[in-house]
Amino acid sequence: MAYLGIDLGTSGLKAIVIDADQLLAGQAAVPLTVSRPRSGWSEQAPADWIVAAETALIELAQRCDLSDVKGIGLSGQMHGATLLDAADRPLRPCILWNDTRAHAEAAALDSDPQFRATGGNIVFPGFTAPKLLWLARHEPDVFARISKVLLPKDYLRLWLTGEHVSDMSDAAGTAWLDIGRRDWSDSMLDASGMARAQMPSLVEGSEVSGRLRPALANRLGLPAGIPVAGGGGDNAATAVGMGTLREGQAFASLGTSGVLFAANNSFRPNAASAVHAFCHAVPGRWHQMGVILAATDALSWLARIADCPPAELTAPLGALAAPGRTVFLPYLGGERTPHNDVHIRGAFIGLDHVTDREALVRAVLEGVCFAFADCRDALANAGTRLDRVTAVGGGSRSDHWLAMLATVLGLPVDVPTDGEVGAALGAARLGLLAAEGAEPDAVCTPPAISHSISPDRDLADAFAAAHARFRDSYARLRDM
């Protein structure tokens, strides 16, 4: 028996196969590009996702036998508005999660008390609902032709099964879901000019959402009719892959964006803290997370300017040292937690004649860690305190960065043993749950830990003082 997981990210699509023991049997990845036709805009063509998925599955079929796959799970970037006409044809490029054009519309919806009371969250510009309000105002011809609105991974599901379905965790990021009740809110839909008929039906992430179409199965070498699970938004699916399902469990994701994620046994919203409170990808669970828009993306930005791979920038850093004078604010495209500020932009502060490349690299790593500390404080304000976190994402390959993060957060950071973790594994696990009807807690176990990194108590005061300068710098920059 085997199970297939497909993770649709912003910069690429990844597909993996795990065996009955949840060991990796094969994987394939295909890159994706983002179009930025105007400042603050971020779009992708849905057709590119299908090409990427088919390419990845064909490559995967060359590396392992797909005829034994019993279930498929999906994971994907959240919030994207994929707009379909009555024939399921995309009406325009998908407006992505990191697109900020709808900031005025988000503010208008957020001023309606029901969105925080029922939806449990600030209406951020990247959420789906304000994008539809923007379209009604700026592209009325497109808006008038919308038959269905799907999230990115759910467009892949439509290709796989022919069904219009989403899961609770991904739907929670639209600003249309009554998150406590785990159902669409008709009044919140109406506030943005939408109706329930334009929404996909909803299932839990571990439930069957549809079955693989025979024609597609034959072309890809997969069994026809196998179940496709509801799946999850990328962070909830990562939590499934990390075994982060129960109260007290948490992870820090150092990916393109940054996420400090805490599992909850109940729905605990606190919108004023700018913490996201969403449904989990398994039934009867929720989660909170602080989100920063640029984590490894900030280091990649510096690497492009330096014309040097990110790993070469960080290789000479050596042992963790106290922060220098230079402060970096990683707000390259605005920020979510805790500021909900689409206008703020990044900055280096405290440059002088002796500032060199290493100082800039250290400042970038520190700035991202300080943004995580802001998320930690926001989670505390929302009623969640963390004892330790598990690291995931590309940035977690740097023990130097993790030592810095542990010291800034004041928390031990656990580093998983090399192996598949994260959203693609979570998707495959959700496919297993849907196919076998298994219990999530039995299947979604935490990864083996290679080592743990403890905070450097000797440097804690220096980093705390630098974090205070970081917060003060944001306030001064915002006022400019």
Image: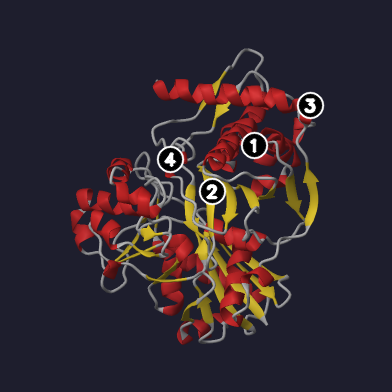
User: In this rendering, which labeled residue sits more in front, label 2 or label 1?
Assistant: 2
**Chain-order first, disc 1 or disc 3:** 1
- What is the x, y in percent for residue 237? 57, 62
Residue named by callout 2: 289
User: In this rendering, which labeled residue sits more in front, label 3 or label 4?
Assistant: 4
The residue that appears at 44% across and 79% down in the rendered structure is 161
- What is the x, y in percent for residue 433? 60, 75
Q: Is residue 256 visible?
A: yes
On the image, which quarter does residue 424 sit in?
A: bottom right
**Chain-order first, disc 2 or disc 1:** 2
Q: Quadrant of the C terminus?
A: top left
The answer to whether 176 appears left or right of 216 in the picture is left
Viewer-proximal residue, 311 or 128? 128
Residue named by callout 4: 272
Marks 2 and 3, Cα distance to the nearest angstrom?
Answer: 29 Å
In this view, 362 is above or below 180? above
**Chain-order first, disc 2 or disc 4:** 4
